[in-house]
Amino acid sequence: MKNASLLINALLAVAVGVLYFLHFSSGSKAPETTSTVNMAAVDSISSFMRIAYVNTDSLWEKYEKIAVLQKELESERAKSEKRILSRTKTLEAQFKEMMTALQKKAQDFEGSSKGMSELIYNTKMRELQELEQNARQFEAQASEEVADLQQTLTNQLLEQEANGTKEINERLKAYIKEYNADKGFTYVLAYSSEAGGILLGDPALDITADVVTGLNAIYSAEVAAQKKDEEKK
């Protein structure tokens, strides 16, 4: 499961690049916030095109929904590991029991084989060989079962991650569209100090604070509304 954990953690890191804005309720309006963008500086820097960017590193640290998504995925990953470990221990115990029974029969056979006829001796030998073959076959099937279970649970986690990323992208597009209604940016780009195509960004074009504030406000409102609905039930 270690490889599965590494894969999931890697996908979590990749998802952050896609998660760079977040969460917009269907049909709801983004709350009004005080803009931190110096539009005069933007107009001066981008005389032909109006460009802004979001620092995804900062967004990763400050957007509350991302932390929630991480915790959910980590919780599911822990459950998957626990389930795999439990099944592995069960199968190992069964295999050990089979081998113990086989060894006992072999010892009993060895102790009584001297007085046996050739026919009985050969019959007992075939029985022992069949028991050993069954034990080895069980071991192989158990190993395959654990591998299949691990792959299934990993795929489920990947699907959960993909669905979350898809939802986030849809919310992002809706939020940026409304945010940009009175800004008129031609492009809103994603910037990261760790990776990405943007090597340098002028601070005057950084709209990260606006995006984080707006997204967190939306998320907080959704959480409050959900709690209110739960209290009514």
Image (cartoon, grey):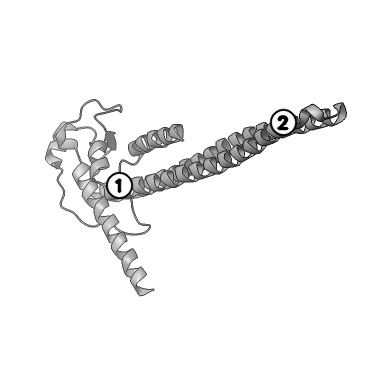
In the depicted structure, whether residue 230 falls above or below residue 11: below
Q: Amino acid at mark 1?
A: Ala
- What residue lies at 38% left-to-right and 49% top-to-bottom? 72
Residue 141, picture quadrant: top right
| Image height of 102 relative to 227, above or below | above
Label ID, residue 67: 1
Compare residues 2 and 107 and report the one nearer the observer: 107
The three-letter amino acid code for the residue at tag 2 is Gly
Query: Mark 2: which secondary structure?
Result: helix
C-alpha span from label 2 to label 1? 66 Å
Residue 166 visible within the image:
no
Q: Front-most of 38 and 229? A: 229
Q: Residue at x 58, y 38 (%)?
A: 148
Q: Mark 2 — residue?
A: 111
Residue 57 seen in this snapshot: yes
Give the mark, 2 or 1, whose residue is nearer the N terminus: 1
Residue 22 at what x, y percent from top left?
32, 47
